Amino acid sequence: MGEASLTKTFEFSASHRYYRDDWTEEENLRVFGKCAYPNGHGHNYLLEVTVKGAVDSVTGMVLNLVDLKQVVEEVLEEFDHRHLNEEMSYFRERIPTTENLATTLWDLIGQGLPEGSSLARIRLHEDEDLYVEYFGGA
């Protein structure tokens, strides 16, 4: 059989702050605006995970949805209701922008997928009219 893609949507909540320690408060506010406010702000994220692979001739599936849910939910459990700057080691050296969060999720989810399937795309919605799409790469 041919190759197909499968997309599943997940939700999680997290807060973050855009801020560089090596910049002044004024420069952070100029570049990041209200995203640099000291207490940060939160989002109810919507994550779309698209996997691709050959359609199995026996099961008719690219990937068992149960397996995909298990991998993604295990990753998101670590992020859900967390302050990304303060609680997540992934963002000690990187600003937790939606772009950086998407690439981090890509790496973690991709590591857990069963053989024969791979990530094709991650779309991370910060709100209803803003999202980042990530397709992998170096």
Image (tube, rainbow, N blue to C red):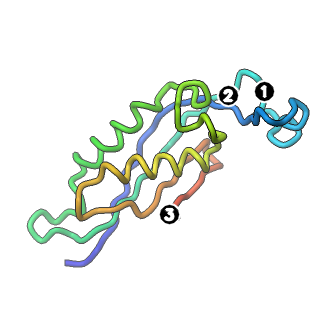
User: In terms of secondary structure, where does tag 3 sit?
Assistant: loop
Label 2, on which residue? 41
In x, y percent, where is residue 112? 31, 49
Residue at image point 29% right, 53% down: 113
Q: Is residue 18 left or right of residue 58?
A: right
Give me the residue at 64% from left, 31% from top.
16
Residue drawn at the location 60% of the way across and 34% of the way down: 92
Three-letter residue code for mark 2: His
Answer few, some or many: residues within 10 Å of disc 3's Cα (few below 14, many 20 plus, some between 14 and 19).
few
The label shown at residue 19 is none
Residue contact between numbered discs 3 and 2, judged by CB atoms under 8 Å: no
Helix, strand or loop status at disc 2: strand
Task: Compare residues 38 and 3 and report the one nearer the observer.
Answer: 38
Q: Amino acid at mark 3?
A: Phe
Amino acid at pointer 1: Tyr
Q: Are marks 1 and 3 in contact (CB under 8 Å)?
A: no
Residue position marked by numbered label 1 in the rendering = 37
User: Picture quarter containing residue 115?
Assistant: bottom left
Residue 102 lies, in percent from the top left, at: 53, 49
CB within 8 Å, label 1 to label 2: yes
Left or right: residue 42 versus residue 65 is right
Q: Quadrant of the N terminus?
A: bottom left
Residue highlighted by disc 3: 135
For marks 1 and 2, give the CA distance. 8 Å
Q: What whole-number distance in Å separates the C-alpha atoms at marks 1 and 3?
A: 31 Å
| Of the pair 49 and 23, the residue shown nearer to us | 23
Which comes before the other along the chain, label 1 or label 3? 1
How many angstroms separate mark 3 from mark 2 (CA)? 27 Å
Q: Which quarter of the figure has residue 29?
A: top right
* Category of crowding for the residue at label 2, using alpha-carbon neighbours closer than 10 angstroms: few (below 14), some (14–19), many (at least 20): some
Q: Earlier in the sequence, mark 3 or mark 2?
A: 2
Residue 106 sits above or below residue 53 on the image: above
